[in-house]
Amino acid sequence: MTQMKNPSRNYKPMFPFSSLFLKQYLLLIIIVLPFASFAQSDDDISTAAFYAKKYKEDDILCLSSIRTFSFDKGKNLLKDNVVEVQEDADYDFL
């Protein structure tokens, strides 16, 4: 009688990383993530406090806004000449 081979011996995990590597990777993410996120600086907090006193009724304040327009020549569905306008906007809210 022939013996059958155990198929689990040839099993390869889906992720070729050892558990030690995975633990080190997770530890690195846990350590680096809080420092990589955007935090409020003291300058941001003092600016917010200043504007909160000045504009008591407003919840949101736009510190700066930049709107840029670009114009191109084009044609509509009727093949008439038209001017195409594209607007790009950048707003900084507090």
Image (cartoon, rainbow, N blue to C red):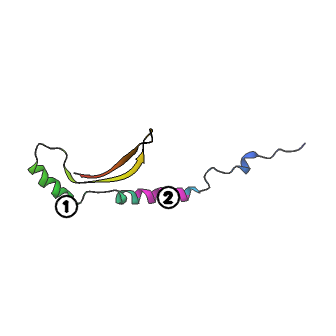
Left or right of 93, for residue 16: right
Secondary structure type for disc 2 = helix
Q: Which of marks 1 and 2 is nearer the N terminus?
A: 2
Secondary structure type for disc 1 = helix
Expressed as whole percent of the image width and height from the top left, the position of residue 5 reads 80, 47
Residue span colored magenta: 20-30
Answer whether residue 4 is magenta in the image: no
Left or right of 87, for residue 1: right
Q: Quadrant of the N terminus?
A: top right
Q: Report the residue that reaches farthest toward the right.
A: 1
* Dot 2 amino acid type: Tyr
Expressed as whole percent of the image width and height from the top left, the position of residue 24 reads 50, 60
* Label total for image: 2
Q: How crowded is mark 1: few (under 14 residues within 10 Å), some or many (20 or more)?
A: few
Asked if marks 1 and 2 touch (Cβ < 8 Å), the reply is: no
Expressed as whole percent of the image width and height from the top left, the position of residue 34 reads 35, 57
Q: Nearer the viewer, residue 63 or 82?
A: 82
* Dot 1 amino acid type: Asp
User: What secondary structure prevails in the magenta region?
Assistant: helix
Left or right of 65, for residue 8: right
Q: Which of 21 and 69 is in front in this view?
A: 69
Disc 2 marks which residue? 25
Disc 1 marks which residue? 43
